[in-house]
Amino acid sequence: LNSVFSDRPQSIFPTMSRLAREHDAINLGQGFPDEDGPREIREIAAQATIDGPNQYAPVEGIEELRTAIAYDNQRFYGLDLDPQTETLVVSGATEGLAAAFLGFLSPGDEAVLLAPFYECYAPQIEAAGAQIKLVNLVPPHWRLDRAAIEKAISPMTKLIVINTPHNPLGKVMSTDELSLIADIAIENDLIVVCDEVYEHLIFDGVPHEPLMTLPGMRDRCIRIGSAGKTFSLTGFRIGYVSGPAHLITGVMKAHQHLAYTSPIPMQKAVAAGLRMGDDYYAAFKADMQAKRDLMAAGLAEAGFDVLPCAGTYFITVDIHSVGRDDDAAFCREITEHAKVAAVPISAFYHPSQSDAPRNFVRFCFCKKPEIIREACSRLSSYL
Ligand code: PMP
Ligand code: GLN
């Protein structure tokens, strides 16, 4: 077929999930919670499905949800958005990202990605006909290299993508790092696509800081959020995009020809979710932080060097510490023999990057504590 999508292997997430099923392994590869989010939200979706309407929603999303998205931006970040022109409902952050890249980029344009990066960015950008300029984050702290980013920018550069908290690294960008991106974006007149799907999963009392709140950034950023992550309902497929009207229009024009709309019952339910009290968010974060701590301790006990995890529900280990040097082979090995699945960090680099590190592996910890304990105990016995 020879297309951007068909020339790539199947996504690492379903690939590892399939291998986990085949070997009856605990699946700490693909990131999804093992318990569904708030029952109130699911009940609203169920009732709204019965009551209807179940016809096409407005392209931009139902008013109730767009108002709730604006409320959420104000509530957590003091951002003042017009729900009518500055918010958009999408069918998951994945579709929102695709709509942003297809809405903003043309053949000849360039986009900067900081590697490693979430898997869908590269094929989506290339499907828009744009060229990707890659800049590696520098391990072990995954530092941003200002000179390397500046070197990657040309007059053809239209946008840069940032992801904080970061999947797969669990890194949260500091204010200094956000300022560095802001400086570069302003200097080079770039759009910044901000993937903030883990905005409510930052640990140790650190607040989430959207790049859009920095001086000069309000009109050049779009912020992408996901009800899948915020409410542990990844199957609902509801995401939201916030930003200035001219950028939202660009995303909407692609969205209307991709997903077109998202199911009304899910939108109604997520609108209610976004109005839940602070106690929901506090409990969600505390629960995930406790799971991170349990997972980090268990992996260290099994013999791994565990890298810091400041946010998301993923934690990274260095497999040199257990005498291995091929992340993809190691993920297959532990799925088959230790009966625990994980994903290789090299899958989050561009296929052209033969210099990608091969010594890091990601484990997902949004699982029941007994599952985390059992997985760590299996790894410990095996290694
Ligand atoms: N961006 C990042 C960084 C993610 O981790 C994910 C989900 N794994 C997505 C986007 C896609 O989210 P959604 O399920 O809402 O499409
Ligand atoms: N975002 C999840 C992860 O990083 C998986 C999403 C997917 O399967 N597409 O594991």
Image (cartoon, rainbow, N blue to C red):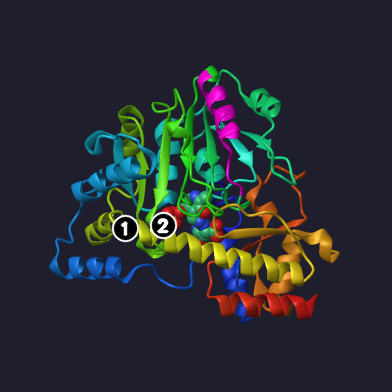
- Give above or below for 254 relative to 333: above
Of the 4 image quadrants, the one containing the C terminus is bottom right
Task: Find residue 161 and report its horizontal and vertical position in percent.
Answer: 53, 37
Q: How far apart are marks 2 and 1 (CA)?
A: 13 Å
Mark 1 and ligand 1: say if the CB distance to the nearest ligand atom is below 8 Å.
no
**Residue for badge 1:** 277
Q: In the picture, residue 99 is in which quadrant?
A: top left
Question: Amino acid under label 1?
Answer: Gly
In the image, taking residue 54 as reference, residue 176 lies left or right, namely: right
In the image shown, does 184 or 18 lie closer to the viewer?
A: 184
Q: Mark 2 points at which residue?
A: 230
Q: Can residue 108 be seen in this view?
A: no
Residue 234: x and y in percent read 42, 62
Magenta highlight range: 171-186
Between residue 320 and residue 280, name the one nearer to us.
280
Between disc 2 and disc 1, whose residue precedes? 2
Give SS at disc 2.
Answer: helix
Kindly report the secondary structure that dominates the magenta region of the rendered protein: helix
Q: Is residue 342 left or right of residue 209?
A: right
Element marked by disc 1: loop
